[in-house]
Image (spheres, helix red, strand yellow):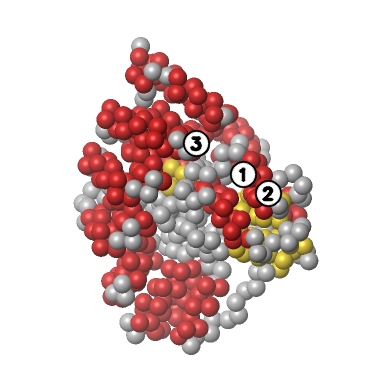
Amino acid sequence: MRKILSLFIQGYAFSLLRKSEEKAINFLGRIDHKFYTPKIYEIYGNLLIRKGDLDLGENILKEGVEKYKKSKGIYRALSQIFLRKGEIDKAIEIIKLAKENNKETYWYNLVLGDLYYYEKKDLDNALKEYIELLNRKDVVFSSDVKSPARYLYKRLSRIFYEKKDYQKAKEYYKKFYDLKPSNFYEKDFLYYGEVLYNLNEKEEAVKIWEEGTKRRRGNIIKKGVKNFGIDLGEVEKIDKKDEFTRIPVFTELITERTNFFDVVKKRIESLIRDGDIISVASAVAAIADGRVFSVETINVSPLANFLSKFVSRPKNNPFATTAPLSNPYAMQIAIEEAGVLRILFASIMSFIGKIFGVRGLFYIISGKVVTQIDDMPASMPPYDYYVISGVHNSKSFCNKIKEVTGCETCIVDANDLGIAWVVDSTDNMDKKEVEKALSDNPQGNEDFQTPIIILRKN
């Protein structure tokens, strides 16, 4: 009976969460902890993080870890609390404990390696974790996004490039390149070519650079190879389109701990003029809003596995992205975000729609948050093996940026296929005009680190 009641509470918490985070927090705070499932601990802990109540969150999650030693989501949330408190070593220790209690979960080598690499700048301990993963016999290294190969090779190749161990860097860049993965970005093409050039394989280096300018936008490569006396053509100008001047704004790496509103204010206050519009990339806005789900914490249901098989995947398109919901991890997040009934209804109507030549019904019915879901590996490390959802309250997010800048603001989901979608915006904005101005994706979806674009009418 207790188990049934616990599952009911868990389901009700999810339904409240879709409507109001505050209501979900108040509800869970009143529930006797004996009814807490691992998922309830995870949900409540993450809500307390978002609220800023780190001490209560730490106590709740420590209790959860003691009760459910194999629940991966609780460890992840607790490590985030320690990171927010600046206690990186404690975050590392809690992930080590998670790894010890979940020996079958090879993703923890990446999680730990990333804590050493990105948080502590400790390359040696990062390498130790990455190499341990590389040597595991129970791991399949393939081009599938659910395999750790592309994420691991990306880190190993970059670390050895930074160490100037070009022979090792070449080994891992080749493994990475041979997968033809969507997360082989412009800087990867540039650095792989540099590695080959420094090993006196100059013809191969130029071939890699040339391919990079065809596969990607090419500006980073064209600028970078000038250091080697090589001209691969003019840098594409992206500063103007139609009636707008577009000003990309560089930022530091945005994480869940970033106060994004402070970053926006600091980065643009000397640039903006009256009448400017601020555009924020949807994936980066979602990361700043804490709407990220690390792959090791996602428990894929049979329904998610089943439904993901019916999502069409682009084929024979090297270095290109795939349909996010074709990955069962992303489909599971869609189910949790929208609810089982809504996803089932959307799936049925989508099937019927395709019979009559009507496409897109699944996303129309399942809602805006599901439409924004980005699959692994759509983001920069360390978020490339995460599923990223949409901003929880996108209208409020835009309004807050307007409060600190005085500019009309929008969240935009754009891609390199010539499609831009204004997810949400402040009220006084022509969304169609903005979508047209950003249709060539001047923000980029890769390692440009320009998630903010200032739009200015000429």
Q: To which residue does mark 1 refer? A: 397
Give the mark, 2 or 3, whose residue is nearer the N terminus.
Answer: 3
Residue 196 lies in quadrant: bottom left
Residue 281 shows in this picture: no
Q: To which residue does mark 2 refer? A: 402
The amino acid marked with disc number 2 is: Lys
Question: Among all residues in the image, which is located at the extreme bottom?
Answer: 229
Q: To which residue does mark 3 refer? A: 51
Say which of marks 3 and 1 sits in front. Answer: 3
The amino acid marked with disc number 3 is: Lys
Residue 367 lies in quadrant: top right
Q: Are marks 3 and 1 in contact (CB under 8 Å)?
A: no
Q: Position of residue 97 (x, y in %)?
A: 24, 41
Q: Residue at x 76, y 59 (%)?
A: 274
Question: Is disc 1 placed on a helix, strand or loop?
Answer: helix
Question: Is disc 3 placed on a helix, strand or loop?
Answer: helix
Q: Residues within 10 Å of mark 1 (few under 14, many from 20)?
A: many
Q: Position of residue 153 (x, y in %)?
A: 34, 61
Q: CA distance from mark 3 to mark 1?
A: 15 Å
Q: Position of residue 88 (x, y in %)?
A: 33, 50
The amino acid marked with disc number 1 is: Phe
Left or right: 90 in relation to 352: left
Where is the N terminus found, in terms of image quarters?
A: top left
Q: CA distance from mark 2 to mark 3?
A: 21 Å
Give the mark, 2 or 1, whose residue is nearer the N terminus.
Answer: 1
- Up-down: is 303 above or below 32? below
- Taking depth in this image into account, of 87 and 13 the one nearest to the observer is 87
Question: Is disc 2 placed on a helix, strand or loop?
Answer: helix
Give the mark, 3 or 1, whose residue is nearer the N terminus.
Answer: 3
